[in-house]
Amino acid sequence: MSVSPTIVRTVPALRRAVDRLRARKATIALVPTMGALHDGHMALVALAKRRANKVIVSIFVNPTQFAPSEDFSSYPRTWKADLGKLAAENVDLIWNPGVETMYPQGFATRITPEGPATVGLEDRFRPHFFGGVATVVGKLFAQVRPDFAIFGEKDFQQLRVVERMARDLDLGVKVIGSKTVRERDGLAMSSRNVYLSGEQRVVAAVLYRAMKQSAVRLQAGGDIQAAMAGGAEMITAAGFELDYFEVRDADTLAPIASVKDGPMRILVAARLGTTRLIDNIAV
Ligand code: PAF
């Protein structure tokens, strides 16, 4: 039987609800989201339930991580469906602040992450992005004070930025990455997949195939440049405009000099028409 989660929209109400959970000695896992929930998000919730007794999901489309030219106003908002999915999973609390609660009049403090936030991947194409993410996630951590926070590996650079921030600022939260959930053809689940036309949706699966092909060549000890050029070519031949297709150190996201350097990650960002998709896999 599903029970409707408690929904809170103000910081004092959130504090009271969290205090009630804490009084029962509950451990708390936070799943930060921007809503438009799909099976990838529900995998984060499932992991949160395995890690902690109580699960809080935040739903907030964060304006500060979108550039003025990006899709903040058209970003999918599916509140009713989201609520149904979270109720079915017996999530304990939904934290759903408005913009005026998160960024009240006169708001003047931002977190500016460095390290993994400045390695020349997403930050090269979306310079505003990680400042916005770090600031909102820092606020969410301060508001909820969770023991655990679950982030999808699909946004791999974001995961590394948030892990670093939690450590650097002693935020007392363990950040946990959750494996990317894929469609049957390999396309990573994303709230932005709804922007793709039927034809583009078929083409989009090439990102995964290209990463796989390059990963196999790297695993076989092949030349890095040639392995990556082959994958990049597959993607552009399918009609994508490529922002990056790179292999990096999986921990630091620094460029790698040799396939013997240790765990690697292939990361891609590419545009199909007006839709920008990102993805990554372990090598
Ligand atoms: O990954 C997302 O959905 C967002 O970047 C996050 C972490 C919820 C911050 O707004």
Image (tube, rainbow, N blue to C red):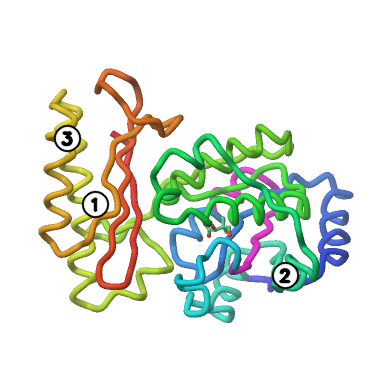
Q: Quadrant of ligand 1?
A: bottom right
Amino acid at dot 1 = Tyr
Question: Which segment did they paint magenta?
Answer: 46-62
Screen quadrant of the C terminus: top left
Q: What is the tally of numbered marks visible in this picture?
A: 3
Residue, disc 3: 216
Q: Residue at x 69, y 40 (%)?
A: 173
Up-down relation of residue 188 to residue 105 (above or below): above
Quadrant containing the N terminus in the rendered view: bottom right
| Residue corresponding to mark 2 | 97
- Height in image: 18 above or below 272? above
Find out if the beta carbon at label 2 lies less than 8 Å from the nearest ligand 1 atom: no
Q: Residues within 10 Å of mark 2 (few under 14, many from 20)?
A: some
Image location (x, y in percent) of residue 78: 53, 79
Left or right: residue 90 compared with residue 275: right
Instruction: Give the spatial CA distance, label 1 vs label 2.
Output: 35 Å
Q: Nearer the viewer, residue 11 or 82?
A: 11
Q: Position of residue 182 (x, y in %)?
A: 33, 56
Q: CA distance from mark 3 to mark 2?
A: 44 Å
Q: Secondary structure at mark 2?
A: loop
The Cα–Cα distance between marks 3 and 1, rounded to whole angstroms, is 12 Å
Q: Residue at x 33, y 36 (%)?
A: 265
Residue 219 drawn in magenta: no
Instruction: Determine contact: label 3, label 2, CB under 8 Å.
Output: no
Q: Residues within 10 Å of mark 1 (few under 14, many from 20)?
A: many
Q: Are marks 1 and 2 in contact (CB under 8 Å)?
A: no
Residue at point 35%, 55% (across, down): 278
Q: Which residue is mark 1?
A: 208
